[in-house]
Image (spheres, grey):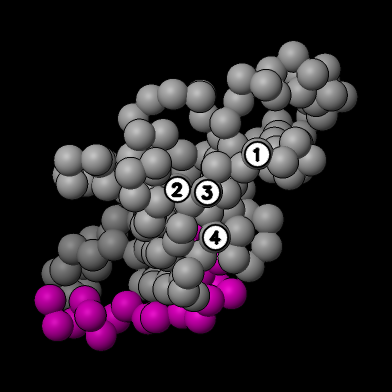
Amino acid sequence: MRQMRKASRQKDAAWALEVFDRAPYVTVSMTRPDGTPYGLPLSLIRSDEKTFYFHCADEGEKIDCLKSNPIVNLSAVSKCSPKYEEEKNNFTEYYHSSIALGKAEFVSDREEMIHALRLLCQRFLPQYMGHFDEAISRSLDRTTIVRITLTEPPVGKCKP
């Protein structure tokens, strides 16, 4: 265990943000109204050094959690490679991971909502951006956008 701690390296906030950018999903952990934990992988997009967005339906457990307590934890892994090191007779794993703490808020400004959705679509389905405006006109009014603003710098760790 001690070797594992020595082998992992803490990285700066810029590196940690890159891990979030490369991760296909980010686990967002929140607190249910009854105080129990709730976490799920979501497709997040980062707008700047402190701002992330995700979209969801207008109702559901995420909405209930965030209305009750807007503090969230983000966790991402962008590399995960298990390995057996024969020369050391050792099982290990190489990884890049990041965590961050933030506050979630529901976005009500239409321009910011469209901005967030545009960023999401450009990241995950850039080849279909020609259909973006039509999709926005059809579904914006029934889509919830959540902005997460980091409340402290993210922390990244890796074992190269």
Image quadrant where one finds the C terminus: bottom left
Q: Report whether residue 104 is seen.
A: yes
* CA separation in Å, label 2 and label 4: 15 Å
Question: What numbered label is drawn on residue 154?
Answer: none
Q: Quadrant of residue 122?
A: top right
Q: Quadrant of residue 10?
A: bottom left
* Residue 151 drawn at (x, y percent): 47, 69
Q: Which residue is mark 4?
A: 149
Question: What amino acid is found at the position of numbered circle 1 in the picture?
Answer: Ser
Q: Name the residue at the top extreme.
A: 138
Residue drawn at (67%, 21%) of the image: 141
Left or right of 74: which side holds 112?
right
Local SS, label 4 = strand
Local SS, label 1 = loop
Q: Which residue is mark 1?
A: 108
Say if mark 3 contacts mark 4, CB within 8 Å: yes
Q: Which residue is mark 3?
A: 105
The span shown in magenta is 1-23
Question: What amino acid is found at the position of numbered circle 2 in the picture?
Answer: Val
* CA separation in Å, label 2 and label 3: 17 Å
Say if mark 1 contacts mark 3, CB within 8 Å: no
> Residue 7 in magenta?
yes
Residue drawn at (41%, 34%) of the image: 63
**Which one is earlier in the sequence, the residue at label 3 or at label 4?**
3
Q: Which residue is mark 2?
A: 26
In this view, the mark in front (3 or 4): 3
